[in-house]
Every structure is written in C-alpha cells, then in structure tokens.
Image: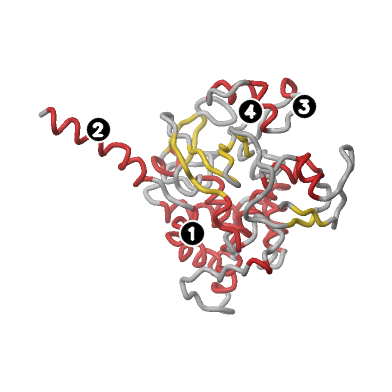
C-alpha cells in the first residue's frame, strides 16, 4: 500500500507536465479548425489562432481546460448555454462553457460575425492581420491596451499567416516549420518566425500558474489588475528587486493588465537569440529592454550611446 502511494506521488509531477501544451502543439491541434472557420466566416485563421493562444494560455488556462472556452467569451445577455464562473475583471464572472474546443472556435466566429461593433473588421482585407488585431482592440474585445500588439507578436512569432495563405489556397500545408535563417541572416525581431523558442514554458506553481523564460529570464503573464506588490509577494521576490527587474520607477501608482510580461529575475546583459532590432514607432528604451530581457544600460553601452540618450523609430539597436 505504501509503495503504491509513493508511486502516485512520484508520478504526480509527470502528470502535471503531461498536461502542458506548448503554443506549437496548440497550433497543430487547432489550425485546421481555424482555417475552416476562416473559409466559412471570413475571419483570418492567424487572428483566431493568436487569440486562442493569448486568451487560453495555449489551451492551458483553467477556463480552457475546464470549460473548453478558448477565447474568454463571457455569457453576455441572451446566452442560454452552459456557464462557468470565475474571478476576472470582477469577482465570480459568468463565462460560456462548451462541450468541446471546436464548439468554442465556432462560437467565437459567430460572436464576431453577429456583434455590430465588430462589423468594420469584415471590411478589411482578410490577410490584413495587423488591421484585424488593432480593430479587435478598438472594438473593445479586451481591456489590455497592448492587446493588438500581443496578437501581432504571436502571429509573427509563430508564422501564423501561413495558415491564412493555406485557407485561401495560395500555398499547401507541408506540416513543416520554415527553416531557421543562418547566423549571418538573423532577423531583427525577437518575435519573428525564426525565433520560436524565445518564450519557453519552464515551470508551474502550486496554484497552476505557468512560468516562462525569455532570453533565459523567468517571467509570468500578469492578470488584469494585479499590482507589483502582489506579484512580488506571490513569487517571493523582494519588492525592490522586483521593481528593478521590471524597470518600474513608480510601482505604487501602477497596475498590470492581462497578458503583461512580468519578470521574476534580473534582465541579461545581452540577448543570445536576437542580434539587432529596429525600433518601432513610439517605442522607448524601456520597451525594447523588456521585450528582449536585456538591461537598458547594456543596450546603450553596446550602441555607444550616452546614459540619457533617447531612441527613435527606424533606429537599429545591437543587442549583443
């Protein structure tokens, strides 16, 4: 009897590990459904997959596992199906519960097609994933101000636009990922298809919260409304150190939004995957430092810039 109990204890961590789904596995599991929905409802498969990855934590969230809800769709007025209650923006909110993930994907399509506030999206080119991402944010799909960029980052990281092309009959699905570019041809974006391993799932807390790594630096995705003090306490990080890791100057005046990357250890001196980066419009040195998990002062030093120097759109920054 004791041996059986011991065996169960030893196998428990393996069972938890087996339950984890990587974003790549999520894509391979649901890409065909996303492409079918694109053909039937004119919603880019890339957008559907990116939303699924983001909203469900690549199928690992409690909402996805227990309610088969991959898109965070709440009950809303008129919903007469099954329900699932959990704390979100407010306590004990009502979410739709489905019999299968496929049912969730279908309801997501119908939700966008039948809600007037999303009607302008269908005037966009079906391959305009950036326009769709920004349109979803503008229409109020999520409260996170970075929601559009989070979708775009995932589409570019996992090369999801190829499923748009396949759905449109412009290319075939050989089930293979694009070849990695050689060292001399590294693309400038850490979130490009050549750098899929930038975010790696490395651990799970007792509360089943997933911990990832970016450039070898551990991080979690914040939940809406969490504060720096709450997260520092939850993960046992000294508050002063937590603020240093996340480059926070006024931590008492801020809250995180759902999907924000929150680092649990110090940033690195360089990025071992991305060689250089071209600054996008509106980005600050802090934005770039957090995106690549590199200390801002090290970025300045590598680029021969002074301490208080500002960066500008189109500027190329060396990261190692």
Q: Quadrant of residue 300?
A: top right
Residues under numbered marks 4 and 3 in contact, where contact means CB atoms less than 8 Å apart: no
Q: Residues within 10 Å of mark 4 (few under 14, many from 20)?
A: some
Q: Counting other residues with Cα less than 10 Å from the Cα at mark 3, is it few (<14), some (14-19), or many (20 or more)? A: few
- Mark 2 vs 3: CB contact within 8 A: no
Q: Secondary structure at mark 3?
A: loop
Q: Which residue is mark 1?
A: 27
Mark with earlier residue (4, 3): 4
Closer to the camera in the image, 310 or 99: 310
Residue sitting at x 39%, y 40%: 66
Q: Is residue 14 above or below residue 39?
A: above
Residue 286 as seen in the image, left or right of residue 163 = right
The x and y percentages for residue 14 are: 31, 42
State yes or no: discs 2 and 4 in contact (Cβ < 8 Å): no
Query: At numbered mark 2, what does the secondary structure look like: helix, strand or loop?
Result: helix
Instruction: Mark 2 or mark 4: name the one nearer the start of the chain.
Output: 2
Residue 249's disc number: 3
Q: Earlier in the sequence, mark 4 or mark 1?
A: 1
Q: Residue at x 63, y 39 (%)?
A: 261
The disc, 1 or 3, on the residue closer to the chain's N-terminal end is 1
Identity of the residue drawn at 34% across and 47% down: 18
Determine the CA span between mark 4 and mark 1: 29 Å
Query: Which residue matches tag 2?
Result: 9
- Circle 4 is placed at which residue position? 225
1 and 3 marks in contact (CB < 8 Å): no
* Element assignment for label 1: helix
Ranked by sequence position, the earlier of labels 2 and 1 is 2
- In front of the other: 1 or 80: 1
Q: Considering depth in this image, is 103 or 278 the residue closer to the camera?
A: 278
Residue 268, compared with residue 194, is above or below; it is above
- On the image, the x and y values in percent for residue 151 come to 64, 52
Q: How far apart are the two marked residues, 2 and 1, measured between alpha carbons?
A: 32 Å
């Amino acid at each position: 009897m004791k041996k059986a109990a011991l065996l169960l204890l030893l196998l428990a961590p393996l069972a938890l590990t087996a339950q984890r789904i990587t974003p790549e596995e999520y894509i391979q599991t649901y890409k065909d459904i996303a492409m079918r929905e694109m053909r039937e409802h004119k919603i880019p498969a890339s957008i559907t997959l990116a939303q699924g990855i983001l909203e469900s934590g690549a199928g690992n969230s409690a909402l996805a596992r227990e309610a088969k809800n991959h898109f965070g769709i709440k009950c809303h007025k008129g919903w007469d199906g099954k329900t699932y209650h959990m704390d979100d923006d407010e306590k004990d909110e009502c979410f739709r519960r489905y019999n299968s993930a496929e049912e969730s994907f279908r309801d997501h399509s119908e939700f966008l097609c039948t809600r007037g506030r999303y009607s302008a999206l269908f005037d966009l080119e079906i391959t305009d994933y950036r326009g769709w991402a920004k349109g979803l944010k503008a229409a109020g799909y999520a409260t996170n101000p970075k929601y559009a960029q989070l979708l775009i980052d995932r589409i570019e990281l996992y090369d999801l636009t190829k499923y748009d092309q396949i759905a449109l009959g412009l290319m075939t699905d050989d089930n293979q990922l694009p070849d990695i570019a050689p060292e001399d041809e590294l693309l400038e974006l850490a979130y490009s298809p050549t750098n899929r391993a930038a975010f790696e799932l490395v651990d799970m807390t007792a509360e089943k919260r997933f911990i990832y790594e970016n450039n070898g630096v551990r991080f979690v995705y914040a939940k809406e409304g969490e504060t720096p003090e709450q997260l520092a306490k939850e993960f046992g990080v000294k508050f002063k150190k937590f603020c240093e890791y996340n480059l926070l100057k006024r931590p008492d005046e801020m809250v995180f939004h759902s999907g924000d990357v929150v680092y649990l250890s110090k940033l690195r001196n360089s990025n071992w995957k991305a060689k250089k980066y071209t600054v996008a419009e509106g980005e600050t040195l802090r934005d770039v430092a957090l995106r690549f998990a590199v200390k801002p002062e090290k970025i300045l030093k590598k680029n021969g810039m002074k301490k208080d120097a500002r960066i500008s759109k189109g500027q190329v920054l060396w990261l190692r």
